[in-house]
Image (cartoon, rainbow, N blue to C red):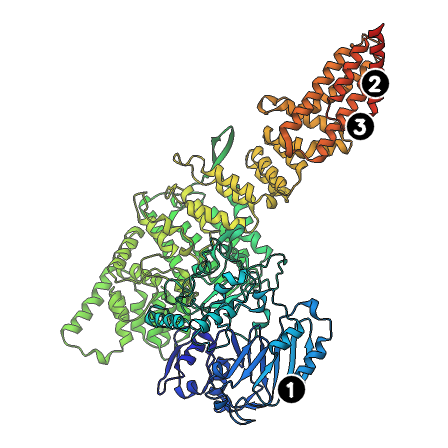
Amino acid sequence: MGLDLDSQASYRQYLVDQSQFKKRKVIMDGVNGSSACSISCEIGTSLPTLRASDYFMEPCLSELAMRELMDPGHCTRVQNFKVGRHGYGSVTFFGETDIRWLDLDKIIKFRRHEIVVYEDETTKPEVGKGLNKAAEVTLFLQISSSKFAGGLTEKLKQISENQGAKFISFDPNRKEWKFCVQHFSRFGLSDDEEEDIAMDDADPEVREPVAMNGSDGSDFDEETALVDPRLLSHSLPSHLGLDPVRMKEMRTMMFPDEEEEDDEFNERFSHHRPPFGNESISKPVLGSTPPTIRKTPLALLEYNTGSFASSPNGSILLAQQNKGIPLTITKVQGFKLEIKETPVTRNYSRNVVDAALFMGRSSGIAWGPNGLLLHCGSTAGNSDQKREISSTIYLEKVATDNVVRDENNKVREELIDICFDSPLNFHKEISHETKEVVVDSHKIKIRKLVSNRLELPHVCRSYIEIIEKKLEVPGLSASARVVLIHQVFVWELIKVLFSSKESSLEADVEALPLIRRAEFSQWLQETVCHRVQDEISSLNDSSDLRQLFLLLSGRQLDAAVELSASRGDVRLACLLSQAGGSLANRADIDCQLNLWKNNGLDFNFIEKDRTRLFELLAGNIHGALGEMDIDWKRFLGLLMWYQLPPASDLASIFQTYHGLLASGRAPYPVPVYIDEGLVETGVSWTPGNRFDLAYYLMLLHATEERDFSILKTMFSAFASTHDPLDHHMIWHQRAVLEAVGTFSSDDLHVLDMGFVSQLLSLGQCHWAIYVVLHMPHRDDYPYLQATAIREILFQYCETWSAQEYQQQFIEDLGIPSAWLHEALAVYHAYYGNSFKALEHYLGCAFWQKAHSTFITSVAHSLFMSGKQSEIWRLATSMEDHKSEIENWDLGAGIYIKYYSLRSSLKEDENSMNERISLEEKNDDCRDFFDCLKKSLAFWDTRLPIDARMVYAKMAEEISDLLVADSGEGSTTKVKLDCFNSIFDSPIPEDLLSCHLQSAVSHFTLYLTEAAS
């Protein structure tokens, strides 16, 4: 007998609640909600009870119930039974212990630095009975690390001996005190002993661990004083450095009447509370001081790592971050909290919204690139997972690449080439017509496939050859092979229904419908042949007549006649040889059957299968089938071969079948993956919501008007495959059919974008853009293609830029190079490569952005590296567009002015021609220095320290060149003006001091000249 007790989060609390009642049974659903099991009340009432959520026991309640079911009487001999309280300690009872009917909430009390077992001496059994037996006790001491000096271990050893216990150990790192006792009363530290050891009382939040599910936190009866520690940890006593739990106890003892009023209030409104169990989130005590409303949710800061293995999933420590204590992440995978009810709906739920209600704004659902989904819980309606609230972040990827995976779920490179590269390369070879669309100042070429019905057989044959190559790949799953074979049949059907037959017959145009009918009949025979053979192989040798009927359902007349003749039934063989022939023969057989019926012939003397054959030969397919189930293709064949006239064209055949389908007298043309039984569960299908692609093609052939209303359903992935994200072949079939003029539609963007997403998930960005260019142009959305292409370039820049052939392919498609440069500029700017970002900003003519990047990130680095020519090249490349750049003179214009000024100063110094006066040079330098100061003020904090250093370096070099000029023919006043310009430049004071002596000398000379 097996039972999954952990499958229900509420089971543990259920057993506790039911322990007071007898002669009741619990009916519990299993994981799938289908199986039920009964647990007798005898087991439920014999289990121990432990209601306090911050207490735990090992084995846990569910494990005890399981073992009691498997081994009756197990609770009378539990080995090393353990009970504990998180943050206080634990006790392990040696040997076998009888724990039946024990109320552990009343028997065992853990308080600060002490344990009390059987506090009521009147209920204490004799030594060795119940829980009054030898055990190992572990207590956690709340003491700071600085107090460990002074022989603490020796003090604890002495205290243990004084109380009649045997000291085991003290772990200073975990602050864990272990000792053994032979029987129980009270063990631990008294108030005087605590004072002697100098316990640390400064941190009440550390001393009183906060449990998620609530804790009594008291030394009195926990049943009447349940306190929510989350409220106490943020109360006034907590902020005053006092123990909030102790303060709550003192209030209860000093004002009992007020506590009784609270209890009455709780009982009066208890029917309004949801029945939360031990593992659910506890409510604050009604009537207690309301907590201060917090505008932001508390973050998960600490984890009680020691309780994960031994306690329910609800006991997780949440605490506000202590000031001055650095945050330490001890568990990175988050936590899960099982629930019975949601706080809002009060009923069972698997909605991800529960995590948001619990974690506040710290949880959510988001879509990432390449079909990546980030969420923090189970999806709604998923019956395979446990009900839980979770802070764990799940990363799941949408499976858009199933078509290129083998039976071992491994991606195969050859499948990527066959499924995508080869068909698209062939598609690219077919003739296209282009249409230019102007987007801003750029142009893109919208493409459209162009073909005709004379070329259609060659096109279909080429696609079939590609599919056949994929069938040769080893390791494909059986379902994948069935879908591939179906795709081959679809291309064959397209060739049969829509290719031109004029070239196959020089004359007699009236015979063209019969030629198409004959080709369709042959196609239908091939598609149902495997179904006929499978059903025949399941029959025994004595079912000759049933075999004959199955052979006729696949139009295998030769085999049917041969089988009938070999069995000696020559007359039946003659009738079978004329099956589906002239209407006169059908009428004769039907007349004979009617005579037998009218004359009261007892058909019990004729085999039922033989009568079925006669009905079929008479053209009565419904009478022949009776209760027999048959697939839709063979039913269509029976209708065409044996009931309708031999000269009926395909349009009338398809319309007749469609009429029978509408009246419920024909089987539904279900998609191939349902027809072949590839998908048992997971894909919901109801009659009429979608059909097989082959049937849609038949309707398209039979529809005379070009306004075909079900194109969206026809060209959905579900029409040909059970993978709703696989559009790689249906997109080509739609393109070819539209190219030969079977229909025209500009509203199939779902198919286009589905194929684009599939290509992007495989890194085929160039082909994705190629597909976007084939989306029909619409006047109401003129920039649809441009927007999609730019999004692809930006989001997948890292992919296509890393592969040169993809980038070249995109450029060959006529995509504006400016779009590529813009995407690359944003990409490199994001990763901090300012040099490449600048080059691409220049490439896409973003002059303002290029100018800002040049000034704030690039120019100073090149200057300090001595790459002066590179600075000149970049600055001059932007100079022709300076009218489009704001504050050009305070940016790149400074560098051009610097190089021009430096060059003129040096050339004038070495030139033998007419020289520029010192006064003119000073004016130019002063203008340059003014530009530097204005630039520093304009760019302000956007200029890094290195850029400011470069400005100072340029000013210093210009100053040196200026003072180096002898200034022949210039007055002393002019030279002093030069020093005034230098001292007004953005040069650090320590560098200006070198010019001070020369300035003083010139000033002294000036005073002398003035005095004389």
Q: Tag 1: Cα neighbours inside 10 Å, few (<14), some, or many (≥20)?
A: many
Q: Which residue is mark 1?
A: 165
**For this view, does 932 lie left or right of residue 526?**
right
Identified by mark 3, the residue type is Leu
Q: Which residue is mark 2?
A: 1000
| Quadrant of the snapshot with the C terminus | top right
**For this view, does 77 lie left or right of residue 271?**
right
Q: What distance separates the C-alpha of mark 3 from that of mark 1?
A: 81 Å
Percent across and percent down for residue 565 are 35, 73
The answer to whether one can see residue 631 in this image is yes
Q: Nearer the viewer, mark 3 or mark 1?
A: 1
Identified by mark 2, the residue type is Val
Q: Nearer the viewer, mark 3 or mark 2?
A: 2
Identified by mark 1, the residue type is Ala
Looking at marks 1 and 2 on the same chain, the residue that comes earlier in the sequence is marked by 1
Residue at 38% from the left image edge and 81% from the top image edge? 26
Q: Is the C-beta separation of discs 1 and 2 under 8 Å?
A: no
Badge 3 marks a residue whose secondary structure is: helix
